[in-house]
Image (tube, grey):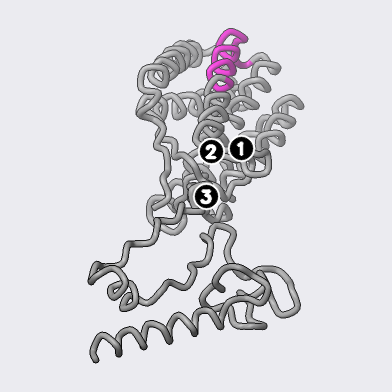
Amino acid sequence: MLAAAWLGRGSWGLLRGAARRRPGGGGARPLGGRPGSAAAGGGRRGGGISCLPACAGPPRLLRAPAAVWRLLSGGAAPPEPPRERSAAEPCAELYENPWTIPNILSMARMGLAPVLGYLIVEENFSVALGVFVLAGVTDLLDGFIARNWANQKSALGSALDPLADKILISVLYVSLTCANLIPVPLTSMIILRDAALIAAVFYVRYKTLSPPRTLSRYFNPCYATAQLKPTFISKMNTAVQLILVAASLAAPVFNYVDSIYLQTLWCITAFTTVTSAYSYYHYGRKTVQVIKNK
């Protein structure tokens, strides 16, 4: 009698499952797909945009009751359903908000670069020195905010902050060279190093972006794929380069253009630039941390 009760219970479950199948369809209907609901028919009532997320897997189907399987197989446990392939695999990047205060400050520093270049070429060194100080304040602020507020730290910021510094420094050195305040060989060395580093950043972005590698996803700052960690000598080099820029801007204002100290600073900047380039070549893989979405 106990076996008959279990068999009757299992048969009733099978009949209910068959009654819930879609009309005209050969398969079982997904759970939660009541007629007229958002999941039924792939969207809203009458057909519309699906409410399921883009990375959601296929809906699970109704399974036969475990009691029926045990009766038909002599008491064996029902087999586990095959593991569905995760549809989130193409979405392996971390999707983050790019509009943080440090990122906005970095973009503002990029916007100040052409203003500074124009002021230097026009030989308005007093105003240029003031704008340069403002750019330095934004550099200090974005680092301070990112270190002290966790919700303001982002993978984009780890690349945007040094990129803003390189754009600002490149524009400043070219402008100061046009104003005959910095020698051409030193500026050429700095531009070549920064161009190589920027090209390396674009290459890392391409290699760490999961398929499909489309232009829209490649340039979408919300998809964070890697975090950059500059070397210590690179940070020192940036500081030395900015000191040279400040000293060169102040030279015509305070009349020490031909100072031996300024020329010594040229040599120090050239040395740190070459050393920094070698450090990236030697520790290249250690300066890139690939982000894996957990």
Near-viewer residue (140 or 26): 26
Q: Which mark is residue 209?
A: 2
Q: Is residue 191 magenta?
A: yes
What residue is rendered at 51% in x and 76% in y? 31
Classed neighbour count for the residue bearing mark 1: other residues with Cα under 10 Å, few (<14), some (14–19), many (≥20): few
User: Residue 91's mark?
Assistant: 3
Q: Amino acid at mark 3?
A: Cys
Residue 241, given in percent of the width and then of the height, sits at 49, 24
Q: Residue at x 44, y 46 (%)?
A: 143
Task: Tell me, yes or no, if residue 130 can be seen here.
Answer: no
Q: Is residue 99 magenta?
A: no
Quadrant of the rendered image containing residue 52: bottom right
Residue closest to the far top: 185
Q: CA distance from mark 3 to mark 2?
A: 10 Å
Q: Residue at x 60, y 26 (%)?
A: 249
| CA distance for labels 2 and 1 | 7 Å
The amino acid sitting under disc 1 is Arg
* 139 relative to 221 in the view: left or right: left
Label 3–label 1 contact, CB within 8 A: no
Which range of residues does the magenta coloring cover? 181-195
User: Where's residue 78, x and y in %?
Assistant: 31, 67
- Specify which label sits upstream in the sequence, 3 or 1: 3
83 lies left or right of 40: left
Residue that mark 1 sits on? 213
Tell which of 255 and 264 is nearer to you: 264
Please identify the quarter of the rendering in which residue 195 is found: top right
Q: Secondary structure at mark 2?
A: loop
Dot 1 falls on a residue whose secondary structure is loop
Amino acid bearing label 2: Leu
Point out residue 209 in the picture as x, y percentages from the top left corner: 53, 38
**Residue at 40% across / 23% down in the picture?**
284
